[in-house]
Image (cartoon, rainbow, N blue to C red):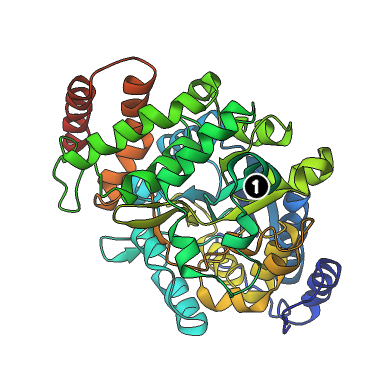
Amino acid sequence: MALTAGRTRRNVLKAIGASAAGALAAPYVKTAGSAGRLRLGVIDHWVPGTNEVLQRILARWGEANNVEVTIDFITTIGNKLLLTAQAESRASSGHDIYALEFHMVPMFKHRLVAVDEVVEDVIATHGPIADISRQAAFLDGAWRGGPAPAMNASAATVARRDLFLEHAGIDLTELFPASDARDPAKVDRWSWEAFSDAAAALHAADRPVGAAIAPVTDSSAWLAQLFASYGAAVVDERGDIAADSDAVREVLAYLTRLTEFMPDSVYAWDDASNNRWIISGAGSAIFNPPSAWAVAKRDNPDVAQHLWHCDAPRGPVGRFRAFNSVFWGIWDFSENQSAARDLLRYVAEPEVIVAMLEASQGYDLPLFRSHYDRTSVWAEAGPPAGGLYNYALRGDERTVTDGYPAPPEIAARISMQRIVPNLVARVTQGGDSFDDAISWAENELEGVLRG
């Protein structure tokens, strides 16, 4: 089923229904001992209606291949996704296929079957997977998961263009137009210092910027891109502790200033709080995928029409965007690994990727660059027209993950223990000196390195 740019969401979903007669026609032949069933644990999507589309896609694949597919949608709030994975791993029982965020693949690699033949086939067909994603799932010389069709996302700047123009004198649509006609000189002025100046003006207008500084994923994401842009790391690429550095102190000094212009509640935010906050109309900017905008379209259209997705601000060493790659792994206790491999291969097909992109209203970023050219959703989604154009990375941003630039397994432990958010909170909320907070972080990192 060929998909072309500009197809509407309705047409894509109709095409999915027709695909059982085409791409899904080849039957899956059950192996000995296979019960013809697959149970999936996938991430509960933030964008309304997207779960239902994924459910239909997988159900039709199951019908065409004589496999009974059951899906459980698991929230990331309260670490439910991780806690469920830990319970299943210990019990050797649960789902056949499980959705794993970037930091979870290294944690569970000993329980995930290698799927090299699946991923290499997909790469041979569709081109390479993004480097940042490869680092998450290609471990010890083997692929421990296949690219997920949903929930791959980045932490773009999501800002009220009306408020930034009125109170900070910054025209975000001019800086980041919904086209390739960017002015590099203007984009270069979008720095963390400029963001802090804008934050001061917006705070004075009672429309502050906000970002979580709490032990949650959203907090780790935006702080990862900020730290990277200053060349700051708590563990370096060699795996050595690097928290006691001028760069880390420079970031902490910056955050000491920036947090003066944020609501005090950011220290208690969960991953849904920033969404609710900007949807309510109280805030002027967050760092997030388009889920906040998608819900605002439904619940508060007056806010949605002003939300503009932009590049992350630039720091002294560059501009970085936090990227969350999601992989679907097969547990080693799965009783139907053959069917699971077939499904992983199928959900990497363009028909599925584009259908999920359209259903998620641009949220689900493909892990293959070749899939980006098959949709115009970011240019066409609205209102406002063009508001999502720059959610897909267009400029000089480099992608990072929490724990960057540490090796994957160490970065995963840094992420799960939320060392960076806690370090920042100790300074900006707890009143610790830089030396005391860094000393605390070094002690925690010693434990991380011991595993």
Q: Where is residue 371, by image quadrant?
A: bottom right
Most foreground residue, 328 or 388: 388
| Circle 1 residue | 165
Residue 270 x/y as whole percent: 55, 28
**Taking the image as drawn, is residue 47 in sight?**
no
Residue 108 x, y percent position in the rendering: 37, 46
Relative height, residue 337 to residue 157 (above, below): below
The quarter of the image holding the C terminus is top left
Residue under the point 22% across and 42% down: 247
Image height of 145 relative to 71, above or below:
below
Position of 124 with respect to 379 (left or right) is left
The quarter of the image holding the N terminus is bottom right
Could you say which is closer to the camera, residue 350 or residue 382?
382
Residue 243 point in image, percent of width and height: 19, 36
Amino acid type at image mark 1: Leu
Residue 275: give x, y in percent of width and height.
65, 36
Q: Is residue 128 above or below residue 31?
A: below
